[in-house]
Amino acid sequence: MGALDKYVVNNGFANRSQAIRFLVEKSIAEEKWQCNHIVAGTIIIMYDQTRKDIATQITDIQREHQELILSSSQYYINRNFCLHIATVMGMAHLLTQLADKMMAIKGIKHGKLVMSRAD
């Protein structure tokens, strides 16, 4: 199995195209936000709520980065899907690293970081 195929499987992407699209968007965002500006934003994650391990992993990551988390909440969309929203503030590159860590959890269906300068 090639590296891209392993990445697709390990990160729960539906196919190679989805993984490539994620990596391109991530690269563009990283270039833009590799700075020390103070920013505020949200990390939005959609996941299968029947997988209890995902919620636990999100909680553990947030606990490790309490200094960046202003608040977080979960919205149960239906029997299967949960929308998790974390409101964050800190240096842009730290928020990018946090979002990447959360979105890399196996089983995340969709994740996005939205930021705006706050300094």
Image: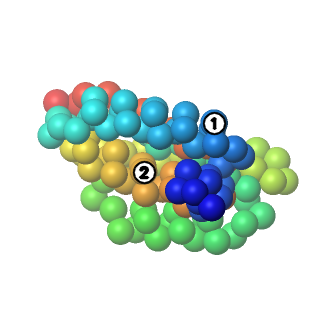
Residue at 15 percent across and 40 percent down: it is: 36
Left or right, 42 with reference to 18:
left
> Which is closer to the viewer, label 2 or label 1?
1
Question: Between residues 37 and 18, which one lies in front from this camera angle?
Answer: 18
Viewport quadrant of the C terminus: top left
Scheme by which the image is coloured: rainbow
Q: Which residue is mark 1?
A: 17
Image coordinates of residue 46 in percent, x first then y, are: 64, 46
Residue at 25 percent across and 44 percent down: it is: 93
Left or right, 54 with reference to 36:
right
Viewport quadrant of the N terminus: bottom right
Badge 2: few (under 14), some or many (20 or more) residues near its Cα, within 10 Å? some
Residue at 57 percent across and 70 percent down: it is: 56
**Mark seen at residue 100:** 2
Mark found first going from the N terminus, 2 or 1: 1
For the residue marked with disc 1, what is the amino acid? Ser
Q: Secondary structure at mark 2?
A: helix
Left or right, 30 with reference to 104:
left
Image coordinates of residue 107 in percent, x first then y, are: 66, 58
Q: Secondary structure at mark 1?
A: helix
For the view shown, which residue lies furthest in the right direction?
79
Image coordinates of residue 97 in percent, x first then y, are: 33, 51
Q: Is residue 75 above or below residue 113?
A: below
Alpha carbons under labels 2 and 1: distance apart: 19 Å
Residue at 53 percent across and 56 percent down: it is: 3
**Residue 55 visible in the snapshot:** yes
For the residue marked with disc 2, what is the amino acid? Asp
| Label 2–label 1 contact, CB within 8 A | no
